[in-house]
Image (spheres, coloured by chain):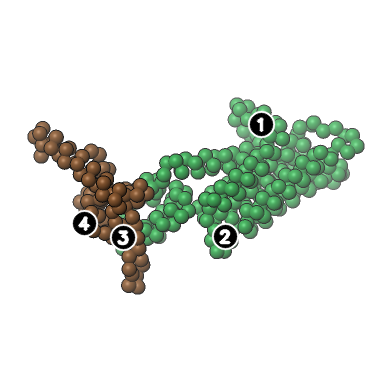
Chain colours: A green, B brown
């Protein structure tokens, strides 16, 4: 119970306080909790959250919350945009125009990437070794992006036969489902990366940036399939290929820099 | 005078008698104000440090973990005097009303 209290205290400290202050406070608390049972800790110190919340400087904490809100919106909006048919009431309220125009949604990628890079560079801590779950999650996200890129290739290279073979008429819903699940997974894993970048090692932001890339790529492809704004004239795909390539390149570059 | 000011006054008063070991300060004050959690006292101690009323340093160690000590700064002494003055006025005002 005491160990549980300490680990919860550590998480709360890293959420509410800047890294240097959190380290200092945790060092003090290690001394304070020494020799007390879990029951005594709760009685004398209160819950870990309450104990750390009163140490937070309101201005600095509000700034972090604002950044967290923007970064969350960057990754969740495109992911939710893909499954918007399920969330149509929400998008009908105020997000419809944003998600109907992929160009706006694409801007969330550089915004989220640059903000995550700059914020965690200044306000994140770096452990000696790379956290063990970062690489498996990056691989998972890369597999998802590879699948979306494959779908993009079948569309841009006009491999309709291949697409029809994979998704015959009776299974065409599967096509949409893979894109939806991919976006959902990218958004969820991206959020995990964001929270862990605050609580643990700043290199978790690489997971956030790649999750964001996956979500934006999914939204881009989803709009390609459903938007019907393209025409089959020679070279019709060039501007879309360029835009898709830019999304992937910005994402991969951001992920690489985030790992430093 | 709020309870927070009272706790602040107590912390500054204890430190005015000489440098204090941080952990001991918490235990001492918690003993006097058992309904106040040590985390609240620790938060006041940190704020005093942040505001420049106290300074923190690591004491000599003999094998064990480094102990953190706190001492008053000039600003802390001024703050202590100001709070003490407020406390005396409050006490006199209450005494005038027959509250002792």
- Tag 4–tag 2 contact (CB < 8 Å): no
Pick whichever of labels 1 and 2 is earlier in the sequence.
Answer: 1
Q: Are marks 4 and 2 on the same chain?
A: no
> Which chain is indicated by disc 2?
A
Query: Mark 3–mark 1 contact, CB under 8 Å?
Result: no
Quarter placement of the N terminus of chain A? bottom left
Residue at horizontal 84%, vertical 39%?
Answer: A237
State the SS at label 4.
loop
Identify the residue position indicated by label 4 in the image: B17
Q: Residue A115 in the image: x percent, y percent?
A: 60, 44
Question: Do the residues marked 3 and 1 share a common chain?
Answer: no
Which quadrant of the figure contains the C terminus of chain A?
bottom right
In what element is the residue under mark 2? Answer: loop
Q: CA distance from mark 1 to mark 2?
A: 35 Å
User: Can you identify the residue that label 1 sits on?
Assistant: A98
Q: Is residue A105 left or right of residue A12?
A: right
Q: Nearer the viewer, mark 2 or mark 3?
A: 3
- x and y percentages locating residue A196 in the rendered image: 54, 52
Q: Which numbered circle lies on residue A131? A: 2
> Is A204 displayed left or right of A140 in the figure?
left
Q: Residue at x 28, y 60 (%)?
A: B21
């Amino acid at each position: 119970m005491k160990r549980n209290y300490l680990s919860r205290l550590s998480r709360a400290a890293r959420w509410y306080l800047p890294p240097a202050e959190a380290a200092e406070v945790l060092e003090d608390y290690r001394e304070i909790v020494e020799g007390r049972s879990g029951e005594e800790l709760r009685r004398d110190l209160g819950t870990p959250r309450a104990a750390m919340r009163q140490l937070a400087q309101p201005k600095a904490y509000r700034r972090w919350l604002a950044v967290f809100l923007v970064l969350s919106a960057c990754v969740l909006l495109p992911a939710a945009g893909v499954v918007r048919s399920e969330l149509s009431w929400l998008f009908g309220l105020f997000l419809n125009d944003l998600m109907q125009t992929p160009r706006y949604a694409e801007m969330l990628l550089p915004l989220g990437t640059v903000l995550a890079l700059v914020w965690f560079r200044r306000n994140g801590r770096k452990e000696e070794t790379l956290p063990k779950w970062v690489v498996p999650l990056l691989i998972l996200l890369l597999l998802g992006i590879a699948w979306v890129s494959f779908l993009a290739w079948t569309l841009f290279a006009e491999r309709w036969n291949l697409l029809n073979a994979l998704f015959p008429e009776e299974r065409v819903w599967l096509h949409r489902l893979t894109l939806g699940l991919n976006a959902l997974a990218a958004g969820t894993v991206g959020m995990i990366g964001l929270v862990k970048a605050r609580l643990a090692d700043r290199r978790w932001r690489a997971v956030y940036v790649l999750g964001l890339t996956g979500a934006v790529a999914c939204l881009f492809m989803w709009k390609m399939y459903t938007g019907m704004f393209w025409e089959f004239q020679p070279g019709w795909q060039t501007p879309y290929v360029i835009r898709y390539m830019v999304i992937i390149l910005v994402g991969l570059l951001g992920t690489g820099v985030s790992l430093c | 005078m709020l309870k927070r000011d009272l706790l602040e006054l107590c912390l500054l008063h204890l430190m005015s008698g000489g440098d204090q070991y941080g952990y001991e300060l918490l235990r001492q004050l918690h003993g006097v104000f058992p309904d106040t959690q040590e985390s609240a006292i620790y938060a006041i101690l940190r704020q005093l440090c942040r505001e420049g009323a106290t300074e923190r340093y690591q004491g000599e160690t003999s094998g064990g973990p480094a102990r953190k000590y706190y001492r008053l700064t000039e600003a802390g002494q001024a703050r202590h005097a100001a709070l003490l003055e407020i406390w005396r006025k409050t006490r006199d005002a209450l005494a005038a009303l027959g509250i002792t």
